[in-house]
Image (cartoon, helix red, strand yellow):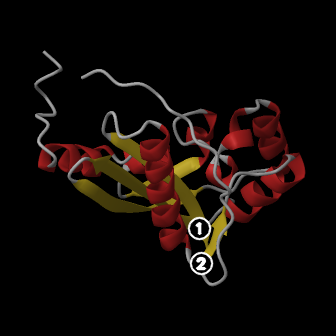
Amino acid sequence: MKYRVHAVALPETPLAGEGPPELARRLALAKARQAWTETRGEAPVLAADTVVALDGASLGKPSDGKEALDMLERLSGRTHEVHTAVALITRTGAQLELSTSRVTMRVTTPEERAAYWATGEPADKAGAYGVQGLAAAFISRIEGSYSGVMGLPLFETAEMLRSAGWAVFSEIA
């Protein structure tokens, strides 16, 4: 299956009263709709958005090192939720699914958090960490979807593609 990346730029600020799952859903669908419009519907569009939530509050991408270190300190020794929504738009309509996982981060030291920030890895990640990278050393438990925590819930994505008529495994061989 051939594909191409079409980046879109949208503000990712939560709306008043909007919870983390709703924010993830809204942003994934908005990204898909914008890409669909910009590409004139020439091909199906798949888009996703991930929101890290702690105590019901959304932790987006950090704006700077201070905010990233603050987020990492707040997550230290705590369990939080990761909500990743994935949207698929085709000529026959739109589908939207949400994956929610619980992630437990071990207690981290200020030195570890600073060293992690210095790698540059957390700069563009929701919650200031990437489970697929160096921050994996901080994660003691995941309940749910590892791929959803990474940013694209593969089970939900495959189910949507299959329901839209794609034989997901036919292109692998």
Would you say residue 151 is visible in this rendering?
no
Q: Is residue 160 left or right of residue 163?
A: right
Residue 93 image-quadrant placement: bottom left
Q: Percent position (x, y) of residue 4?
A: 42, 25
Quick check: marks 1 and 2 in contact, CB under 8 Å?
A: yes
Of residues 40 and 46, the one nearer the viewer is 40
Question: Which label was assigned to residue 53?
Answer: 1
Callout 1: SS: strand
Q: Residue at x 13, y 50 (%)?
A: 163
Q: Which residue is mark 2?
A: 56
Look at the picture and state if 25 lies above or below 36.
below
Question: Which label was assigned to residue 99?
Answer: none
Q: Is residue 46 left or right of residue 114?
A: left
Q: CA distance from mark 1 to mark 2?
A: 6 Å
Q: Percent position (x, y) of residue 149?
A: 46, 50
Of residues 85 and 127, the one nearer the viewer is 85
- Where does the N terminus fall, quadrant-wise? top left
Residue at the farthest front position: 40
